Amino acid sequence: RQIAPSAYAELESIELDALDVTVFNGVAPPIRAGQSALYIHPTGADSPWPNRGRVFDPIITRIEREEPLLRWIHGLRSVGITSALRLVLSAGDVSVATSLGSDGEDAMIVRRDLGTQRLAAVAFRISESNFPLQIAYPLFLLNAIDWLSADTHELVPTYTTDRAFSVSVSGTEGLDTVDVSGPDGQVESVSVV
């Protein structure tokens, strides 16, 4: 659900505990320990990544293909970006997409794994790029949500509907049945095998 930045501070702990991933667009409010977040153009005193100004018309020249945020993405060189923050990385940060300019390298997409908390950032405003027009954009969002929520299961993109198939579900150890909600809202108990 979408929440105005001013209303975010008013959320109760129980509401925050229900969130697997929080996406902050152009803001970086304080977050709780253990809360995973994707920051788009993170600005402000509470940004996990301070910045050292802006870079204009950066071109992504290097991606780390083995990174979970870029799974199934083969290149980002065609992403046009008007400007981006020059994020200051900390020890342990991984720049998964980097631009090279006259002032050196700048992280365009970065991730940080703190064990109980995962953070990722896109250094530019999505609205000031053609990233949403690229096939890589929905893949990046899918990958980011999977990684940030520590989802270890693979995407089930398609399957034949007239045959049974198995889906791996975490947290079912010791259970005999689980409830499955269908597209019509009907709930059915199915056996765990």
Image (cartoon, rainbow, N blue to C red):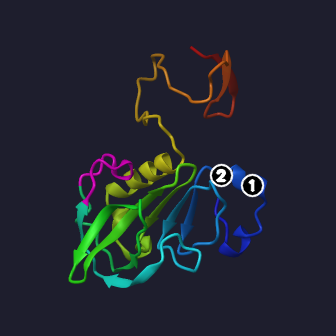
What residue is shown at x 62% (from left), y 54% (from top)? 34
**What residue type is disc 2 on?**
Leu
35 with respect to 127 (left or right): right
Q: Which residue is mark 1?
A: 15
Q: Is residue 62 above or below residue 166?
A: below
Give the residue furthest to the front. Answer: 91
Mark 2: give few (<14), some (14-19) or many (20+) Cα within 10 Å: few
Residue for point 32% across, 60% down: 134
Q: Camera-side residue: 8 or 66?
A: 66
Residue 28 at what x, y percent from top left?
A: 58, 72
Q: Residue at x 65, y 52 (%)?
A: 19
Residue in the image at 43% along x and 37% along y: 155
Q: Quick check: 178 above or below 140? A: above
Name the secondary structure under disc 2. loop
- The residues tagged by marks 2 and 1 sit, at their Cα atoms, a distance apart of 7 Å
Q: How many marks?
A: 2
Seen in the image, is 186 located left or right of residue 139?
Answer: right
In the picture of the structure, the residue carrying the numbered disc 2 is 19
Look at label 1 and name its amino acid: Glu
The quadrant in which residue 123 appears is: bottom left
Mark 1 element type = helix
Q: Nearer the viewer, residue 158 or 191?
A: 191
- Dot 1 crowding, Cα within 10 Å, few <14, some 14–19, many 20+: few
Instruction: Check whether the beta carbons of the residues at disc 2 and disc 1 lie within 8 A of each other.
Output: yes
Spot occupied by residue 38 in the image (x, y as percentages of width and height):
51, 61
Name the side, left or right, on which 111 lies relative to 20: left
Image quarter for residue 96? bottom left
Magenta segment boundaries in residue numbering: 63-74
| Front-most of residues 123 and 126 | 123
Residue 80: image x %, image y %?
Answer: 28, 72
Q: Is residue 181 above or below residue 38?
A: above
Quadrant including the N terminus: bottom right
